[in-house]
Amino acid sequence: MAGRTLLRHLLAWSLGALALVWASFVVVGFTTGLHEADELTDGHLASVAALQAALGDSRFDPARRPDPGRDVDASLKSHDYQQSLSVVVWDGQGRLLTSTGDAPLPPFDAATGFADLQLGQPAARWRSFSRWDGPERQRKITVMLSVQERDDLAWDIAEQVASPGLWLMPAIAVVLGLATRRGLKPLHDLSRDVLALDVHRPQPLPDRHPHEEFKGMVAAINTLVGRQHAALQRERQLASELAHELRTPLASLALHARTLQGPMAEADRRASLQRLEDDAMRAGEVVQQLLSLARASRTEMDEAAQPCDLAALAREVVADYAQRAHDSGHELALVEEPAGQAFMLAGHPLLLALALRNLIDNALGHTPAGTLVEVQLQAGERWLQVCDSGGPAGARTASTGPAASSVYTAGLGLGHRVVDKVATIHDARFEQRPPPPGFASCYRLSFGPGGTPAAI
């Protein structure tokens, strides 16, 4: 496969089609030449017979068989179309009046027209044409030509007709190859430009490909380069965020580990151990979010989109978190509008569940006990959102200021990265929305009419 090129592919098909047409023309030309040579000789025979019939009452010497080549210029005797015709003339009673040429004398009969005769010893084939001189039938004329001589002429004519194709095919193949190679030059130029692209720089393909066929390809490649650059930028930013998120708990872990090695009061030791546990949990959360991002990318590549009911998926996820919400002192609820209606879309159920779990995890993990966390679905408008009250259920506030949501938004960059990536895969939009009355924070996934995953 490595040796196959578009040039060879085009040449193979072009020359194959040309060879088929060329062979057809050669065969047709050859058979036409043979047929025309037969008609030419038959017409010649009939013409000579008509000429003899027009001689009228001329007297012939039956004993004399003149040499047809005598008194003929030597250069004319070597002419390709000079044929040795034999003429035999009988009277009405079958008496031989005269004969000329090399053909043996055929038997006399009353038949006329074209015929193939076997004459001589050994027998040889002769093509003949016979006719009477008129209605009175005073003389019968038979003109004969050797079939071998006629076939030689036929083959010569056929070769002359077909021979141009023998040199025309190689000549056309060479010219067609050069023309195809030159015609593919814009494609080679585009290939070189694509090879010269640097994915680390947002530099699109140069706009020097005027052909209409390449415009869509150039636009697609530039779009892909832009997406790749944007993805690289996001990965760099994510790596920076990861380094920042991991640096603090790891540094704190090292600091408190060294502190625990020295003498300290029991209360300070317990505080340091608690801080070690908290820092370890924070580092574990960062690593878990990183694994979630990797899982989202792998699932995007490995699984094909399939129809799924987002409402049923949300019920399953909320049911899974019911015990955790109870243990942490949170209230967890699911609100569907319209109630019980399916929310169908084409996507990856595993990724959608992963996104919803991240939103619920963030809400449960970064709000105090007593907070209401509510998963809301709107099948008609095709969105899903997770809202929290930001405090105890008995003291809900509609405030959207920094004080109300600061505890929720702290340290949520990685979790939201996961949700944003899943949204991008499903051609959806992830954003923070103004919370409904009674809630402090709200994050929404909005799906398009078709809910078709994007090709990224």
Image (spheres, rainbow, N blue to C red):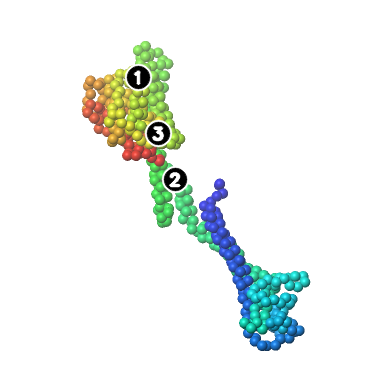
Q: CA distance from mark 1 to mark 3?
A: 26 Å
Q: Is residue 416 or residue 378 the one in the foreground?
A: 378
Judge the density around disc 3: few (<14), some (14-19), many (≥20) Cα neighbours within 10 Å. Answer: many
Secondary-structure class at tag 1: helix
Asked if 85 appears above or below 234 in the picture, the reply is: below
Q: Residue at x 61, y 69 (%)?
A: 35
- Number of numbered markers: 3
Residue position for label 2? 198
Of the residues under marks 2 and 3, which one precedes in the sequence?
2
The amino acid type of the residue labelled 3 equals: His
Residue 31 image point, x, y percent: 61, 66
Rendering quarter of residue 243:
top left
Q: Which mark is residue 323?
A: 1
**Residue in the picture at 60% in, 71% down:** 36
Q: Where does the C terminus fall, quadrant-wise?
A: top left
Residue 142 visible here = yes
Q: Which mark is residue 348?
A: 3
For the point 23% across and 24% down, which residue is it?
396
Q: Position of residue 237 (x, y in %)?
A: 38, 35
Q: State the residue in front, 9 or 190.
A: 9
Q: Earlier in the sequence, mark 1 or mark 3?
A: 1
Q: What type is the residue that disc 1 sits on?
A: Gln
Label 1 crowd bin: few (<14), some (14–19), many (20+), radius 10 Å? few
Please name which of the two marks, 1 or 2, marks the residue nearer to the observer.
1
Q: Earlier in the sequence, mark 1 or mark 2?
A: 2
Packing grade of label 2 (10 A; few <14, some 14-19, many >=20) is: few
Q: Position of residue 281 (x, y in %)?
A: 39, 22
- Label 1 to label 2, Cα distance in Å? 51 Å
Q: Position of residue 45 (x, y in %)?
A: 64, 77
Going by the numbered disc 2, the residue's amino acid type is Asp
For residue 373, above or below residue 172: above
Q: Could you tell me which secondary element the residue under label 3 belongs to?
A: loop
